[in-house]
Image: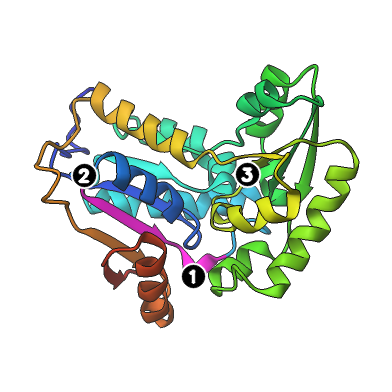
Amino acid sequence: MSHSPSNHAGNDAPVGVFDSGLGGLCVLREIRQRAPAERLLYLADHAHFPYGTRPLAEVRKFATQITRRLRAEGVKLITIACNTASAAALHQLREAFPYTPFVGMEPAVKPAVRSTGTGAVAVLATEATFQGELFSSLLERFARDTAVLTQACPGLVELVEKGERYSARAHALLLRYVQPLLERGVDTLVLGCTHYSFLKKQLQHVAGPGVTIIDPAPAVAEQIIRVLSANRLARSAPAEAAAPIVVCTTDRSLEARFSAQAHALLDEPVQVRAVK
C-alpha cells in the first residue's frame, strides 16, 4: 500500500464502519467474531437516517462527509456497511481517497444464483439500492439465466431502529413483502440491506424452511480481514484482550437509546459518543 501524508494509519488504528443507523452493526459483529483483536469504530449517521429513500447524489454527499470524519479519527480501513451508500458512493470514494482501503456491500446475487433450485431468487433491499449501477452490474455479470425479482421493503429499516424486530408489525410487513415472491417460485432470498440481518429469524419463519436466506455480512467481514492482511494492517494482540468497540451517532438526542441498542445487538459493552 502506498504511503501518503494523508494516511498515517497503522496496525493499531481502528477499522471504521458506517451506516445510516444500526444496521451495519451486523457487519461489525461478524468482524468482532473473526478478529477480536481489531479496534472497531462504528458511525451511525442518524442525523440523515434513513438513506434508502434519498436520492443517490445526496447519499454520496453524506458518505463523503462520514469518510472524512473517519479518516480524521485515523481509521486504517473504511467499511461502508450499507447497501444504499455502497451503491451511491463506493466507486467515487475509492477515487477520492486512493490511500484508504474501502470495503462495501452489494446484494449477494452470485451465491443466490448458485444456490437456487427453482431458478428464481429475490433481493430484498431499499429502492435506492436497486437504482445504483452496482446492482445492474451484478445482474449483468451473474444472473443472465436466472429470474431475479426485486422487492423494496419500506418500513422495515425503521422498525429495526425502533427495536421492534419481533413485533406484530414487523411480522405483517415481512409477510406482505415475501408472500408474493414465494407464490412466484422464489426459493432464495438475498438480504440487500444490513438492517434486514436483524430480521433473519423472523424472515425464515415467514418464508418457511425450504427457502434459503443469504446474508452477506459474514462474507463482507471475511473480505475486510483479507484486505487488512493484504495491506499488512491486521492488528495482532491476544484474543482474550479484545479491543473496545466505540460507536458514534450524528444525532446527540439518540445517544442513550443507541448505546442500549448496540449493547443488546452486539451482546457486549460499547463506548458511545456523539459526533457532529
Q: Secondary structure at mark 2?
A: loop
Q: What count of labels does the image hold?
A: 3
For the residue pair 94 and 211, the one nearer the viewer reads as 211
Identify the residue position indicated by label 3 in the image: 192
For image coordinates 50% across by 37% down, the residue present is 90
**Where residue 141 sits in the image (x, y, percent)?**
67, 18
**Where residue 105 sits in the image (x, y, percent)?**
52, 39
Residue 40 located within the stretch drawn in magenta: yes
Q: Which of the marked residues, 1 or 3, is nearer the chain's N terminus?
A: 1
For the residue pair 144 and 176, the one nearer the viewer reads as 176
Q: CA distance from mark 1 to mark 2?
A: 27 Å
Q: Secondary structure at mark 1?
A: helix
Residue 79 located within the stretch drawn in magenta: no
Looking at the image, is 205 positioned above or below residue 104?
below
10 Å crowding of disc 2: few (<14), some (14-19), many (20+) = many
Mark in the foreground, 1 or 2: 2
Identify the residue position indicated by label 2 in the image: 38
Q: CA distance from mark 3 to mark 2?
A: 26 Å
For image coordinates 48% across by 68% down, the residue present is 46
- Can residue 116 be seen by looking at this rendering? yes
Q: CA distance from mark 1 to mark 3?
A: 22 Å
| Mark 1 in CB contact with mark 2 (< 8 angstroms) | no
Q: Amino acid at mark 1?
A: Ala
For image coordinates 35% across by 34% down, the residue present is 224
Q: Tell me the magenta residue range.
A: 38-49
Q: Which mark is residue 47?
A: 1
Q: Which of the marked residues, 3 or 2, is nearer the chain's N terminus?
A: 2
Looking at the image, is 126 positioned above or below residue 2?
below
Q: Quadrant of residue 274?
A: bottom left
